[in-house]
């Protein structure tokens, strides 16, 4: 687990969707390391999710893995109901479940649209809805956008649009939830060293550059830090927005992108 020497989330409960892999797994471990009891939502990889539960437990924390496909609103409701049954309260939602998509305009189908928006946009909306229903004053909701929401990339229209919609939801929900003392923000990660990034990294390059320069060389041109983020570095952003340190920050999307340009 991440070595963290504070307990900002002692006595609090967090739900992390997409918590079995990549950034979501790093977020779950980070929140647990800072004292939260963590519900790890996963869609299919039970072994990975249970591995994180064991890691948290071995370090003296509390965690449970619960299966839920965020594309299904009924499963989202069941996830939060089970979380309340397990821990009796909810303080933090870190919505990290997501799906990538690359394809040219002429190839996009209605099924593609429904699939991407069901997970990246609708899933986050209804996760926020369920979380807010169970939160008291001081609740923290952190959704996941992407640097792609504000950067043009060939063939990335559908994915980027789903993330731009997420940023708009965060902005508009802030006014509504602020009346209840709940904040809602988003993280916009840049390139991060996950299995999803490994599978899709070449697609972010201009078509004329693909297969001509390596990822590391490309990053030195397009990133101030010249490298991919580690999931733990992005997780620190979620932990900040979920903490009392960000009590006066809401409706905003925080880029954690290594100076991507």
Image (cartoon, rainbow, N blue to C red):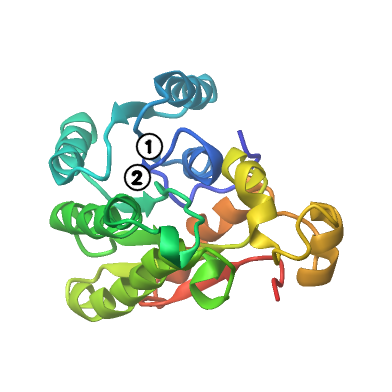
Q: In which quarter of the image is the C terminus?
A: bottom right
Question: Looking at the image, is mark 2 or mark 1 earlier in the sequence?
Answer: 2
Check the picture and name the quadrant holding the N terminus. Answer: top right
Q: Give the residue displayed 37% in from the left and 76% down from the top.
A: 250
Q: How crowded is mark 2: few (under 14 residues within 10 Å), some or many (20 or more)?
A: many
In the picture, the disc for residue 38 is 1
User: In this view of the protein, which residue sits in the foreground, 181 or 155?
Assistant: 155
Furthest-front residue in this view: 106
Check whether the beta carbons of the residues at disc 2 and disc 1 lie within 8 A of each other: yes
Residue 242 placed where, x, y %? 42, 59
Residue 243 visible within the image: no
Q: Classify residue 86 by image quadrant.
A: top left
What residue appears at the point 12 percent right and 41 percent down from the top-left corner? 74
Find disc 2 in the rendering and name its residue. 14
**238 sits left or right of 203 in the view:** left
Q: What element carries label 2?
A: strand
Give the vertical position of 247 relative to 36 (above or below): below
Label 1, secondary structure: give it.
strand
Residue 173 shows in this picture: yes
Q: Position of residue 108 (x, y in %)?
A: 39, 59
Crowding at mark 1 (Cα within 10 Å: few <14, some 14-19, many 20+): many
Query: Could you say where residue 105 lies in the image, as x and y percent from the top left?
Result: 44, 66
Q: Nearer the viewer, residue 93 or 115?
A: 115
Relative horizontal placement of residue 22, taking residue 124 as reference (left or right): right
């Amino acid at each position: 687990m991440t070595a963290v020497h504070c307990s900002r989330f002692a006595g609090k409960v967090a739900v992390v969707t997409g918590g079995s892999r990549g950034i979501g797994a790093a977020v779950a471990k980070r929140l647990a390391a800072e004292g939260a009891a963590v519900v790890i939502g996963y869609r299919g990889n039970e072994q990975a999710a249970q591995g994180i539960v064991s890691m948290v437990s071995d370090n003296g924390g509390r965690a449970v893995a619960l299966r839920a496909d965020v594309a299904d609103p009924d499963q989202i409701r069941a996830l939060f109901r089970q979380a309340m049954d397990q821990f009796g309260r909810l303080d933090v939602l870190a919505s990290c479940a997501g799906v990538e998509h690359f394809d040219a305009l002429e190839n996009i189908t209605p099924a593609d649209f429904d699939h991407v928006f069901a997970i990246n946009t609708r899933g986050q909306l209804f996760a926020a809805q369920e979380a807010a229903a169970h939160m008291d004053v001081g609740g923290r909701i952190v959704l996941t956008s992407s640097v792609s929401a504000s950067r043009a990339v060939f063939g990335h229209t559908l994915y980027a649009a789903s993330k731009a919609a997420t940023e708009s939801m965060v902005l508009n929900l802030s006014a509504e939830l602020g009346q209840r003392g709940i904040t809602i923000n988003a993280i916009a990660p840049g390139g991060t060293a996950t299995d999803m990034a490994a599978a899709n990294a070449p697609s972010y390059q201009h078509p004329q550059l693909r297969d001509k320069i390596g990822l590391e060389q490309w990053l030195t041109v397009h990133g101030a830090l010249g490298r991919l983020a580690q999931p733990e570095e992005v997780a620190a952003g979620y932990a900040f927005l979920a903490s009392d340190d960000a009590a006066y920050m809401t409706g905003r999307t925080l880029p954690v992108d290594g100076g991507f340009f």
